[in-house]
């Protein structure tokens, strides 16, 4: 009798739980959206989609990712700026668009400190420097690549996900330190740049390490360096820039989640908690790792402090490079 009563009680409790969950889902808004400023299939897009999966039936019944590409990520930021501050529109963006663009563009359509609220850091990552079929297979190190560029100056070029982004500047600093005239080709994301590199239209690409990983087994993309202080755990056989004699090229970057500035503290706190929980889920951590990304959920205050720190670090480097959006 006791066992029967236990089973009946458990079944009833489960039914109540399901009813409660159903009621909760029914009370949610129909749709929330996450903007990604770069092409589908890249690391920004993958990060946004992994977060969106976990926010379904938490923020809204459906959470969709919209790739608002163009202007080096600025179109997505402009769209977020004008979105309703109800917690149903978020953005996943690299640091570059908020911490570097203010130093390189005389006029932006947004003000990072005024138009957006930080929600949570999402991931961190190192950059990779890769080459494709245009560069001979005998080129295996940065030193080899520098020698090849000097022997083939017309082909000494590189692609990056956006003009004025951190991967753009990492390659610029490398070119200057190596003494090569490095021509830059900006793209709407790293994946389109790598596609052209693998097709022989551009010699090399600077972008997040994770963007290269899926292409390495084909042999049409080869990593020559990574940008961290130590070897990247997702590409441990690849030497860093510093190991290869470029000791000042030690950089990483992060993606952050943002929302419109006028969202209430209640909405911000609720959304931040949901995003941090999504990024802490073991399956999300594992999926992001496959793209060379380390999940790094954190508080809005932590993200604000991180943005200021990185923006302050890059300001003098950008002056040294001499880049402006008009240059």
Image (cartoon, rainbow, N blue to C red):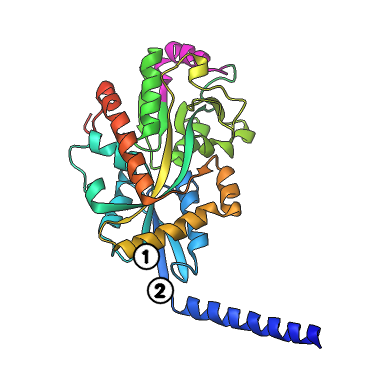
Q: Which residues are magenta?
A: 139-157
Q: Which mark is residue 35?
A: none
Q: Secondary structure at mark 2?
A: loop
Magenta stretch prevailing secondary structure: helix
**Mark 2 or mark 1, which is nearer the start of the sequence?**
2
User: Residue 10 at what x, y percent from top left?
Assistant: 69, 81
Q: Do the numbered discs 1 and 2 sit on residues whose CB atoms are within 8 Å?
A: yes
Residue annotated with mark 2 = 29
Q: Which mark is residue 88?
A: 1
Which residue is found at the position 48% from the left and 18% from the top? 242
Q: Quadrant of the N terminus?
A: bottom right
Q: Nearer the viewer, residue 81 or 195?
A: 81
Quarter containing the C terminus = top left
Q: Is residue 203 above or below residue 306?
A: above
Residue depicted at x 57% and y 82%: 19
x and y percent of residue 108 in the render?
21, 44
Is residue 41 placed above or below 270 in the rendered structure? above
Left or right: 154 in relation to 115: right
Q: Position of residue 235 (x, y in %)?
A: 59, 31
Q: Is residue 85 magenta?
A: no
Residue closer to the observer: 281 or 326 = 281
Q: CA distance from mark 1 to mark 2?
A: 8 Å
Q: Nearer the viewer, residue 273 or 2?
A: 2
- Determine the residue positioned at 41% across, 14% down: 178
């Amino acid at each position: 009798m006791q066992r029967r009563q236990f089973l009946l009680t458990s079944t009833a409790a489960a039914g109540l739980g399901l009813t409660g969950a159903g009621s909760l889902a029914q009370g949610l808004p129909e749709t929330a959206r996450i903007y990604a400023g770069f092409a589908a299939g890249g690391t920004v897009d993958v990060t946004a989609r992994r977060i969106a999966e976990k926010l379904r039936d938490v923020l809204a019944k459906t959470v969709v990712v919209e790739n608002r590409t163009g202007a080096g990520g600025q179109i997505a930021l402009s769209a977020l700026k004008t979105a309703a501050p109800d917690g149903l529109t978020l953005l996943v963006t690299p640091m570059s668009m908020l911490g570097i663009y203010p130093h390189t563009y005389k006029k932006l359509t947004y003000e990072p400190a005024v138009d957006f609220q930080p929600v949570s850091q999402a991931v961190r990552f190192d950059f990779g420097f890769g080459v494709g079929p245009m560069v001979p297979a005998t080129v295996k190190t940065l030193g080899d690549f520098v020698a090849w560029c000097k022997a083939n100056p017309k082909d000494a070029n590189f692609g990056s996900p956006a003009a004025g982004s951190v991967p753009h500047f990492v390659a610029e600093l490398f070119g200057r330190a190596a003494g090569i005239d490095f021509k830059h080709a900006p793209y709407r994301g790293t994946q389109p740049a790598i596609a052209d590199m693998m097709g022989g239209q551009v010699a090399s690409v600077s972008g997040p390490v994770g963007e290269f990983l899926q292409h390495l087994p084909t042999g049409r993309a080869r990593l020559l360096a990574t940008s961290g202080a130590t070897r990247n755990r997702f590409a441990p056989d690849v030497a860093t820039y510093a190991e290869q004699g470029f000791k000042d090229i030690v950089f990483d970057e992060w993606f952050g989640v943002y929302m419109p500035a006028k969202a209430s503290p209640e909405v911000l706190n609720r959304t931040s908690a949901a995003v941090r929980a999504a990024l802490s889920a073991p399956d999300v951590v594992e999926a992001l790792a496959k793209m060379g990304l380390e999940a790094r959920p954190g508080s809005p205050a932590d993200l604000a402090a991180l943005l200021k720190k990185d923006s302050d670090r890059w300001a003098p480097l950008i002056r040294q490079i001499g880049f402006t959006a008009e240059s």
